[in-house]
Amino acid sequence: MDPVAFRIFGLEVKWYGVLIVLGVALGMLLCARREQRFSLPKDTTVNLILIALPLALVCARAYYVIFSWDYYSAHPDRILSVRDGGLAIYGGLLGGMLGAFLYARHAKIPFMQLADLAAPALALGQCIGRWGNFVNQEAYGNPVTDPAWQFFPVAVYIEREGGYFQATFFYESAWCLLIVLFLLLAEKRGWFRKRGDEFLAYALLYALERAVVEGLRSDSLYWGGIRVSQLLSLLIALAVAAYFAIRWLHSRKKA
């Protein structure tokens, strides 16, 4: 598939960018339709995205550059060249959270209320954005040498490698879609009892998936011999699980 979606005045617009924009747009729509349910002022989503999105993009690039410094220290002219790829999801999430925190302080809205609003939208954006990796033929996993498993969605053919590899981009996309469906169902049925529970559920479910899938990928960012995103995923999953466990034990004692 041609990575270039279309051209405007000689400028190439790539599918990767189109899909990211689509993910952001649908995420905004999902948040906007749920503002009233969260008792938030009208246009909260628009105001939030104006602050959070730029910070998310900057931090997504910074995260990627920092953990690819061996290359960028020798090619500093490529640091700002995002058209060639190089945006890390965890960096984007951290930047978006910073933007949400700043907006929450400015608008005097509880941060966790905004985080709950954004949680399904984040997973939806990740679900859609991962297909940009399919177009770019990146974020794939280990080689699949058994012909019986050389089919999508188990594996994907990578032209430059001349072989089949685990379709890890799809594994994450499918899991993120399941997260969206679970969060919206749980939200509708009132399963989240405290402010922040929906966002923490998202964080736990995504971290568990990423900890597994990151271990399969062939293009992980490393810190020494450690896969950075896998380590971060494990820490997040353990922290959130510990929080829920402690809260459950506390409630049992009260009962």
Image (tube, helix red, strand yellow):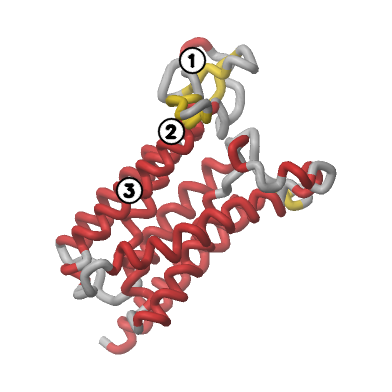
Spatial separation of the CA atoms under disc 3 and disc 1:
34 Å
* Residue 4 as seen in the image, left or right of residue 116: right
Mark 1 secondary-structure assignment: loop
Q: x and y percent of residue 169 in the render?
A: 48, 34
11 or 244, which is in the foreground?
Answer: 11
Q: x and y percent of residue 241 in the render?
A: 45, 66
Tell me whether circle 2 and circle 3 mark residues in contact (CB < 8 Å): no
Q: In this view, does 94 lie above or below 221?
A: below
Going 19% across and 58% down the picture, which residue do you hit?
33
**Quadrant of the image for the C terminus?**
bottom left
Which is more N-terminal, label 1 or label 2? 2
Q: Give the residue number, with chain letter if any, for mark 2.
A: 131
* Residue 160 as seen in the image, left or right of residue 242: right
* Residue 173 as seen in the image, left or right of residue 183: right
Q: Residue 25 got which mark? A: 3
Q: Give the residue number, with chain letter if any, for mark 1.
A: 150
151 or 122, which is in the foreground?
Answer: 122
Q: x and y percent of residue 166 in the render?
A: 53, 27
Going 36% across and 74% down the picture, which residue do you hit?
112
Q: Residue furthest front?
A: 9
Q: Residue furthest bottom?
A: 254
For residue 60, say whether it is visible: yes
Spatial separation of the CA atoms under disc 2 and disc 3:
15 Å
Going 57% across and 62% down the picture, which residue do you hit?
235
